Image (tube, rainbow, N blue to C red):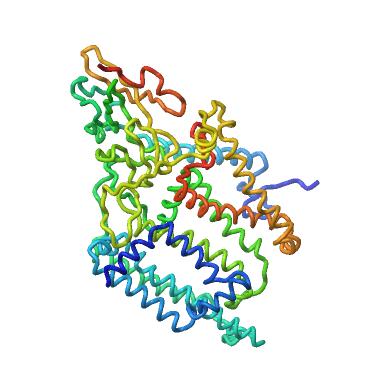
Amino acid sequence: MAKPTASIGKNENSTTDNSVDRKGFISWMTVGWVAFSAATGGFFTMMIRFLFPNVLFEPPQSFKIGYPDDFTKGMVDIRFKKKYAVWIVRDQSGLYALSTVCTHLGCTPNWLNTEQKFKCPCHGSGFRKTGVNFEGPAPRPLERFKVYRAEDGQIVVDKTKKFQQEKGEWENPESFLELA
Amino acid sequence: MIDIIKHFINVISNPTISFTLLTVLAPLLFPPTDWFEKYHFKFGFNRLWKKEGAYFMFSCITLFLIAGYTDEFAIKILTKPDNIPIVLMFYLIPLTLWLAMNQAYNNDERLARGEAPLEQNDPKDKVLVWPDLVYIELICLLLFMVFLIVWSVYIGAPLEEPANPAATPNPSKAPWYFLGLQEMLVYFDPWIAGIIFPIFIMGGLMAIPYIDTNKKGQGYYSFKERRIAIFIFMYGWLALWVYLIIVGTFFRGPNWNFYGPFELWDAHKVEALSNVNLSEYLWVKAWNQGLPENILAREFLGFVVVILYFVVPPAILAKTYLKEFYLKIGSTRYSTIMFFGLAMLSLPIKMYLRWTINLKYIIAIPEWFFNI
C-alpha cells in the first residue's frame, strides 16, 4: 500500500522542512475550514442582522380612535387609513375596524362611497362595507381587528389581534364593538 | 366617421369580443389542420405573409396610432412613458412575425415544388462567433445603451414619489412585461397565477425540445412541416401573453374595470361583478341549501371537475383522434404535452367562465389558501 503523502508543489522525495505530513495536513485543513466557516458564518450573521432595522418608525399596533360619537352611523371612516391602515365602519348596531390590505395580493383598496364598496385598483377585487369579498379575485374577506372601549371611554383598535371571517372569527365579541 | 370607427374599436375591444375574435382567428391565421388551411387560403389569410400583407398590417397599425395620438383619451395611454415599449411592440411583433412567416411560406412553396429551402443558398463559409458576431453585438450594445440614456433623459424617466402603502395609484399597473401576469391574477388565486403558472410557462418552454422531436424545419423556416406546434405556440404567445399585455395597457382603467382605448377613464363606471364560487352555485343556487361545514364536502364538485379536466380529455383523445400520435410519442411525452396544454387552456376557460357566469373559483378553500 502506497503511503499517501501530501506535498504541495514539491517533489515526493523532497526531504526539506517545508514538506507537510499527513497529520499536519489534516490539522491545517481543520484550521482552514474553521476559519472559513467562521468568516462566512460571521458574514451571513451580519447580512441577516442587516435585515432587521435598529429603529422602527412604525405606528403603534394599538391606538385610540376617538369616542363613539365621532363616528356617523352607516359611514366608513377613512381617516385612519394612511397612518394605521384601518377603516372604521360604523353600522346601525356598532363599529368594527377593517384592515386596508386586500386579501388577494395586498394592495390598498379605495372606499367608493357612491358604490358603497371597497375596490382594489390592482386586480379589481371588490368588498362590501362589511369587508366581505364579492367581486374580482380576492379569495376571502378583509380582516377585522380587535376593538374595545378604553377606561376613558375612547375606542381602541388593537391590530395585534385579527379576526378572519372564513374561520368564523367575526362571531367573536372582540371583533366588533356594540354601540347604541 | 372617425368617431364611428373609434366607437367600433371601443366596442370590439371588450375582452369578451376581442378575445373571442382572436381565438377564432388564430387557427385561420396559423392553420393547424387541413380543414383550417382550406379556409386560410379561401379567405386569403396567406396573403398577410406576402408583401401586400405587410403593407396592410403596418397601415392598420399606423392608422390606429394616428387615431390614438389625436384622441384626447388614448393619447394619455400612448404617451405615458411606461407604455412606450408597448407602442414599439405594435410594430416589432408584427414585423418579426411577418419576417418569419414570409420566409416560412416561401420555403413551403419551394419544398412543395421539390426544391431545397432558401437557407440552402446561404454562404457555405461559416462566420466565427468570436470576433465576428461578438464584435457586432458589442457595437449594438453600446449604441443601444447610448440610445437608452438619451431617451431616459429626454422623457425624464418616470421616478414617482416615495412608496406609500396607503396610496395605491388607481389603476395600479405592473411594468408592461408583467401585465400579462397581472391580467392572469384577475382570474386566479395569487398562488396559481403568480407562482404556479409562471413555473409552468418556463417549465413548458424548457420541455419543448424534449417533447417536440420533429426533425423537420431545423435550420430553415417552415410553417407547413410543423404547423400544429407553431399554432399552439402562436396561440399561447399572441393570445395568452401579448394580447393580455395589450389588455392590461389599453383596456384596463380605474378600479381595474374594462375601458375601450378611446374611452374616458370614468372612475365611477359601474360594473356589476358579483362573483360566485362553484360550490355556491352547486349548494346554494342549485340545491337550495347552505354550504356544508366540511370543507371537502363543500368543494367536492370542484375537485371532481379539476381532476376530470386533466384526466378525461387526454384519455379519450389517446383512444380516438390522437391515437396514432399517442402510439408514436409514448405515454410520458403524451401526458406531458397534455398536462401543459390543458394548464395553458385553463386560462382562457377560466377567463370565459368569469366573463359569462361570474365564476370566481372552481375549488375555493380560502381556509387553506387553496383556490383554483
Q: Which residue lies furthest to the right in this view?
A: A1
**Residue A64 higher or lower than A109, as above or below:** above
Residue in the image at 47% along x and 43% along y = B360
Q: Can residue A35 be seen in this view?
A: no
Answer with the quarter of the image where residue A46 lies.
top left
Q: Relative to residue B219, is residue B190 drawn left or right?
A: left
User: Is A88 placed left or right of A102 in the picture?
Assistant: left
B83 to B96, vertically: above or below = above
Q: Is residue B205 left or right of residue B93?
A: right
Residue at 45% x, 24% y is A168
Measuring from the top left, give residue B156's x and y in whole percent.
23, 61
Say which residue appears at 49% left-offset and 81% top-offset.
Answer: B47
Residue B70 appears at what percent x and percent y? 24, 69
Q: Position of residue B167 (x, y in %)?
A: 26, 42
Hey, which residue is sitting farthest top in the picture? A151
Which of these two is toward me, A102 or B211?
A102
Please identify the residue farthest to the left as the structure is shown: A70
Is B311 positioned to the left or the right of A75 in the image? right
Q: How many labels does the image show?
A: 0
Kindly indicate the quadrant of the structure image that contains residue A117.
Answer: top left
Say which residue appears at 25% left-offset and 31% top-offset.
Answer: A76
Q: In this view, does B163 lie above or below B217?
A: above
Q: Where is residue B117, by image quadrant?
A: bottom right
Give the position of the N terminus of chain B as an image quadrant.
bottom left
Residue situated in front as seen by the camera: B239 or B319: B319
Q: Position of residue B148 (x, y in %)?
A: 32, 67
Q: Is residue B256 visible?
A: yes
